[in-house]
Image: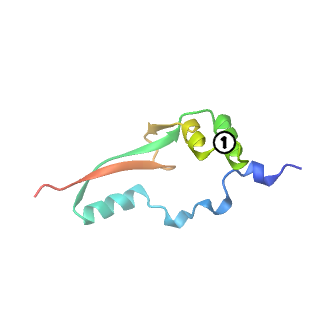
Amino acid sequence: MINSSLTRPIPRDAHVGNKFIRPHELAASMNRHGLREHEFAGLSPDINPLTALNALVRNKLGRMSFAELGSKLKLKRSDDLSISYMGFARARAR
């Protein structure tokens, strides 16, 4: 039998879905606080999914540091905001 700790490299409780801020919620909050939405961009993996999984497992087993994991898990800009995103805003001109 396969050890479930190896097949689940990220703990089940690592993320609490209802605490995530969705892009449209962030844009509304920025507008309420006098900030002008400038741009949002998605972040998507830029490596083979098996390579990413291998790196996550090696990190979980203590064979790879978080610094090394960060250098292996390359991300690229995308239009998909559903997994991860970033953005910025500017104050409105007065």
Q: Please name whichever residue, 71 or 51, is drawn nearer the observer in this view of the structure.
A: 71
| Rendering coords of residue 63 (x, y %) | 71, 42
Question: Dot 1, crowdedness within 10 Å: few (<14), some or many (≥20)?
Answer: some
In terms of secondary structure, where does tag 1 sit?
loop
Residue 29 higher or lower than 69, as above or below: below
Quarter of the image for the C terminus: give it. Answer: bottom left
Q: Residue at x 70, y 47 (%)?
A: 62
Which residue in the rendered view is the most extreme toward the right? 1
Q: What residue appears at the point 53 percent right and 36 percent down from the top-left corner?
A: 74
Residue in the foreground of this view, choosing between 56 and 76 = 56
Q: Position of residue 50 (x, y in %)?
A: 68, 36
Query: At x 44% / y 44%, what residue is drawn?
Result: 42
Name which residue type carries label 1. Met
The residue where tag 1 is placed is 64
Q: Is residue 38 left or right of residue 46?
A: left
Residue 46 falls in image quadrant? top right
